[in-house]
């Protein structure tokens, strides 16, 4: 009788443990949306879209110049032909310590914080890509500094619908850390060690010889990949 009771208790403990493990795995699986490394292909007037991935850091002066001088001017012109894909991690690293992620950024903790805010912005606004692109251009071009995320939602009329959601994502450390881990993995997988920040990747392929052209005349680089050619675009 005692042996039977002991067996029943052990059996229940095994069931509970397995169920808890399954629940935890399910929760982790649904924690963060996977980010794409391969290009998304849509069609606009029978012209396949290309995907331009921008690997950058929030406090990198070269990244800010790229957003202000190249990305901002081409957004409206190329929006029907380009998927703008943003990867805000820059020259950084990550370390898992006692079950928690810690991040190190080239320009210090403030850059890590601002990268994470942008990661949450991308998570909240993925289905509104043009809106997201303009928001990130505002963020990277802002002189407000620490409060640029707040100020840009105000300036663009996004505060009521989106600011609270972005902030909630940012404050949830486990979730926002998972987003940063994904961006870190993408950066370290796609870019070679010699790559500079920012870097432009077209359709998932890094081309070292195009980096200077992309930083100085991004439209010309994009036009190389748009087929068939669109009259009046390039």
Image (spheres, rainbow, N blue to C red):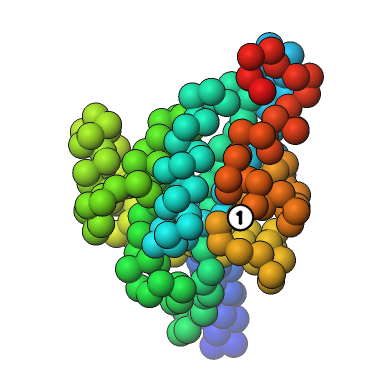
Residue 192 screen position, x and y as percent? 71, 66
For residue 164, side relative to residue 230 (left or right)? left
**Nearest the camera: 10 or 81?**
81
Above/below status of 181 relative to 84:
below
For residue 87, side relative to residue 214 (left or right)? left
**Nearest the camera: 40 or 141?**
141
Taking the view exactly as shown, the residue that stands out farthest to the bottom is 2
Residue 99 screen position, x and y as percent? 47, 79
Splitting the image into 4 quarters, where does residue 137 fall?
top left
For residue 129, side relative to residue 196 (left or right)? left
* Quadrant of image for the N terminus: bottom right
Does residue 205 show up? yes
Please report the residue visible at 23 percent of the width from the left and 46 percent of the height from the top.
Answer: 150
Above/below status of 180 relative to 226:
below
Please report the residue visible at 59 percent of the width from the left and 87 percent of the height from the top.
Answer: 3
Please report the residue visible at 66 percent of the width from the left and 64 percent of the height from the top.
Answer: 195
Splitting the image into 4 quarters, where does residue 176 fall?
bottom left
Q: Secondary structure at mark 1?
A: strand
Badge 1 is on which residue?
A: 199
Residue 51 screen position, x and y as percent? 66, 37
Residue 29 screen position, x and y as percent? 56, 55
* Quadrant of image for the C terminus: top right
Q: How many marks?
A: 1
Please report the residue visible at 66 percent of the width from the left and 52 percent of the height from the top.
Answer: 211
**Nearest the camera: 105 or 27?**
105
Q: Would you call the spot at circle 1 few (<14 residues within 10 Å), some (14-19), or many (20 or more)? A: many
Taking the view exactly as shown, the residue that stands out farthest to the right is 228
Does residue 23 show up? no
**Nearest the camera: 124 or 186?**
186
């Amino acid at each position: 009788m005692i042996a039977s009771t002991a067996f029943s208790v052990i059996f229940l403990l095994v069931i509970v443990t397995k169920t808890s493990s399954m629940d935890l795995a399910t929760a982790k699986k649904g924690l963060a949306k996977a980010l794409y490394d391969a290009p998304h292909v849509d069609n606009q007037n029978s012209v396949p879209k290309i995907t331009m991935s921008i690997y950058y850091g929030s406090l990198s002066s070269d990244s800010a110049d790229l957003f202000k001088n190249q990305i901002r001017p081409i957004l409206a012109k190329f929006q029907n032909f380009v998927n703008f894909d943003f990867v805000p991690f820059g020259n950084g690293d990550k370390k898992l310590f006692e079950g928690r992620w810690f991040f190190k950024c080239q320009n210090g903790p403030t850059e890590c914080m601002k990268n994470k805010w942008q990661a949450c912005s991308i998570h909240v606004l993925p289905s509104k890509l043009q809106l997201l692109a303009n928001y990130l251009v505002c963020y990277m071009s802002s002189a407000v500094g620490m409060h640029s995320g707040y100020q840009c939602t105000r300036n663009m009329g996004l505060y009521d619908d989106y600011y609270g959601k972005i902030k909630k994502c940012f404050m949830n450390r486990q979730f926002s850390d998972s987003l940063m881990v994904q961006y870190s993995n993408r950066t370290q997988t796609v870019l070679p060690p010699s790559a500079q920040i920012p870097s432009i990747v077209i359709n998932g392929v890094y081309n070292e010889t195009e980096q200077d052209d992309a930083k100085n005349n991004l439209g010309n680089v994009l036009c190389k990949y748009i087929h068939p050619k669109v009259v009046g675009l390039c």
